[in-house]
Image (spheres, rainbow, N blue to C red):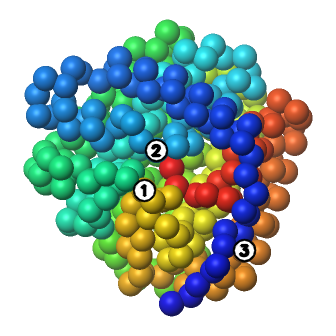
């Protein structure tokens, strides 16, 4: 087993962590308002799966991207909430016995362990339409609303997140090369990060070039995220990651393919490339830059 003794980026940014916690706290209130009251087993399990856990990195990225274009915080966070609902669905289903069969998520029993497999499946099924319901209720123009709905549906469908899940289960052939891993990562993780950034640009009626730059930043962010997550799965602490380690011990990962030194180099190269994509936005993009540096320290989300 490949071992690293420390994170490639051990330095912390306490000011950024405080920003992240502040956005997370605001988002938590919005999610509580969006979710149905937990008066049934299904609704209780939905709340269990979405509230009180995770770093909310995708939500932070949407909030920060929207801020570049002076989008009201409340609108940005409602879009971020829709993204978090979709992300929660993907985690609930990813943890199922037919998928990764994970016992822990966000430092507590995974949904199917707490409520049963059938309920967990239905939780995921319920979170997806709730996300689109949230987008359809936004107080923005119909054109912006429709574009957000259309883009998110593409990102999480059979050519996006679901396709990545199929690849991860080896249902589309073996994962054998770095190119395979990059494709898997982009579909399963990267495209939702890309949308999180692009959504902020859509809300701000940004130019095509600004929108593309932010989307590319999100895709590169997702790549770094996955590379560090692969390291954490092999060498991390379950209390930090909030999920079982060694889940991918029988899979080809960026760590097992590249080794620790080359993996670190790839993360550094990707970070530089990601930061370069933000150059058109100047100092206003500082929160996004700090988020990129942060994910290289901790991973998880």
| Dots 3, 1 in contact, CB < 8 A | no
Q: Nearer the viewer, mark 3 or mark 2?
A: 2
Earlier residue among tags 3 and 1: 1
| Dots 2, 1 in contact, CB < 8 A | yes
How many numbered marks appear?
3
- Front position in the image: 112 or 251: 112
Horizontal and vertical percent for residue 202?
62, 27
Horizontal and vertical percent for residue 26?
52, 22
Is residue 167 at least partly visible in the picture? no
Disc 2 is placed on an element classified as: loop
Q: Is residue 1 above or below residue 78?
A: below
Horizontal and vertical percent for residue 158?
36, 53
Q: Nearer the viewer, mark 3 or mark 1?
A: 1
Q: Is residue 200 above or below residue 192?
A: above
Disc 3 is placed on an element classified as: helix
Disc 1 is placed on an element classified as: loop
- Front position in the image: 170 or 251: 251
Q: Which residue is mark 2?
A: 54
| Dots 3, 2 in contact, CB < 8 A | no
Alpha carbon of mark 2 to alpha carbon of mark 1: how far? 8 Å
Horizontal and vertical percent for residue 242?
42, 56
Q: Is residue 44 above or below residue 188?
A: above
**Callout 2 crowding tier (Cα within 10 Å): few <14, some 14–19, many ≥20:** some
Q: Which residue is mark 1?
A: 242
Looking at the image, which residue is at 41% across and 76% down? 246
Looking at the image, which residue is at 54% across and 65% down? 229
Q: Is residue 298 left or right of residue 135?
A: right
Looking at the image, which residue is at 72% across and 74% down? 264
- Front position in the image: 152 or 18: 18
């Amino acid at each position: 087993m490949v071992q690293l003794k420390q994170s490639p980026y051990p330095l912390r940014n306490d000011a950024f962590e405080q920003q992240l916690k502040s956005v997370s706290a605001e988002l938590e209130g919005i999610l509580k308002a969006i979710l149905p009251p937990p008066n049934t087993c299904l609704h209780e399990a939905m709340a269990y799966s979405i509230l009180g856990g995770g770093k909310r990195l995708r939500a932070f990225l949407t909030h920060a991207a929207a801020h570049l274009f002076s989008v009201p915080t409340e609108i940005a966070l409602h879009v971020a909430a829709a993204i978090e609902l979709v992300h929660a669905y993907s985690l609930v289903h990813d943890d199922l016995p037919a998928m990764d069969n994970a016992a822990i998520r966000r430092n507590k029993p995974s949904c199917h362990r707490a409520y049963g497999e059938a309920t967990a499946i239905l939780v995921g099924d319920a979170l997806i339409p709730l996300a689109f319901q949230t987008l359809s209720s936004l107080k923005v123009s119909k054109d912006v609303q429709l574009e957000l709905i259309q883009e998110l549906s593409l990102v999480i469908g059979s050519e996006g997140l679901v396709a990545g899940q199929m690849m991860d289960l080896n249902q589309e052939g073996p994962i054998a090369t770095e190119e395979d891993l990059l494709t898997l990562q982009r579909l399963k993780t990267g495209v939702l990060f890309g949308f999180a950034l692009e959504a902020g640009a859509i809300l701000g009626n940004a130019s095509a070039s600004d929108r593309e730059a932010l989307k590319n930043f999100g895709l590169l962010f997702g790549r770094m995220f996955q590379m560090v997550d692969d390291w954490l799965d092999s060498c991390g602490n379950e209390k930090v990651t909030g999920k079982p380690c060694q889940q991918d011990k029988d899979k080809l990962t960026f760590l097992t393919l590249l080794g620790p030194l080359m993996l670190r180099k790839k993360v550094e190269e990707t970070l530089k490339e990601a930061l370069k994509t933000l150059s058109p936005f100047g100092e206003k993009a500082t929160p996004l830059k700090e988020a990129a540096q942060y994910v290289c320290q901790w991973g998880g989300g």
